[in-house]
Amino acid sequence: MKPIVGVCALLLVVVLFALAQPTMGAWEEPAQRIARLDAECEKGMHGSCFTLGVMLEEGNGVAKETARAAKLYERACNGGHADACSNLGVLHESGDGVTKDLKLAMTLYQRGCDEGSLLGCTNLGAMYTNGVGVPKDEALAVKLDQRACDGGIARGCRNLGAMYERGNGVPQDLTRAAELYERACKHRDAGGCSYAGDLYVNGRGVAKDEGRAAEFYQYACEANDARACKNLGVLYEEGTGVVRDPRHAAELYERSCNGGNAGACSFSADIYLNGSGVAKDENKAAELYRRACDAGNADGCANLEKLNVKR
């Protein structure tokens, strides 16, 4: 069976995507909404500053302006908007639109968390988990993720699940990890769905159930989790937990490859090289092996070399 990759490193940061609904009852064109939010922000309505910042950061109905979003987040944060502090921390951690400053990011996450932003708690927990900008402190990270998870933040549940799966900061408990991943998945966290699938496909902490694993991978893949699409492709290629369907496997591998998963590029190349579910195409296989190799996939490099020798 092709390898299905397990839980990987925790994601460090989360941007709050949800936008507050317009205060007006009628539908607003994006330009009208932006003008309204800008005017409200100038009047000291910090929620409007925050919402406009999210729109600018994401390019939602407006040209993307991360630097301006950062200024709006700062204004809202200084006005007591906890999630704005967290979002500003995200920008400083990544250096997107502002100077990269891990110490300031940590301060902003802490401030947001202290003032009620559970996203701030999660982001701060990720820093302590990985020792990014702060001394590594997994026990503290567990407390922060637990607080976020208890408050309904799916990413907090997923990160906490990873701690229990690995035994980082807590005694290893795979059953608890599965519960947390499923809880995250129910709140539409793609990573939580994907990691739950890993446990079910391998029977770790739960009864082995490839069909159930396929369901979790499907949820995650539909939410554009490239790794889940690849793992689901493995199940369809081999007929494990699902009806064997090499053509669908090829589609899933290609989707995962286009989403940046190098291993899926190599698996997709295998399909085209062997003509399993698709028309045999050595040129297409070579292209996919090259993509995998260029992304650092050793199997892709080795298979490309073998194919070139053969040809």
Image: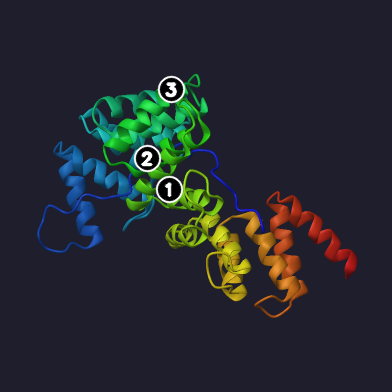
Q: Camera-side residue: 102 or 180?
A: 180
The residues bearing labels 2 and 3 have C-alpha atoms spaced at a distance of 15 Å
Q: Residues within 10 Å of mark 3 (few under 14, many from 20)?
A: some
Residue at 65% across, 53% down: 3
The residue identified by callout 2 is: 157
Residue at 53% across, 60% down: 229
Residue 289: x and y in percent read 73, 61
Seen from this angle, which residue lies furthest left?
Answer: 25
Reply above or below: 233 against 115: below
Q: Camera-side residue: 270 or 1?
A: 1
**What's the mark number on residue 192?**
1
Q: Quadrant of the N terminus?
A: bottom right
Residue at 44% across, 63% down: 222
The residues bearing labels 1 and 3 have C-alpha atoms spaced at a distance of 21 Å
Look at label 3 and name its amino acid. Ala
Please indicate, yes or no, whether residue 174 appears anywhere in the rendered image: yes
Q: Quadrant of the C terminus?
A: bottom right
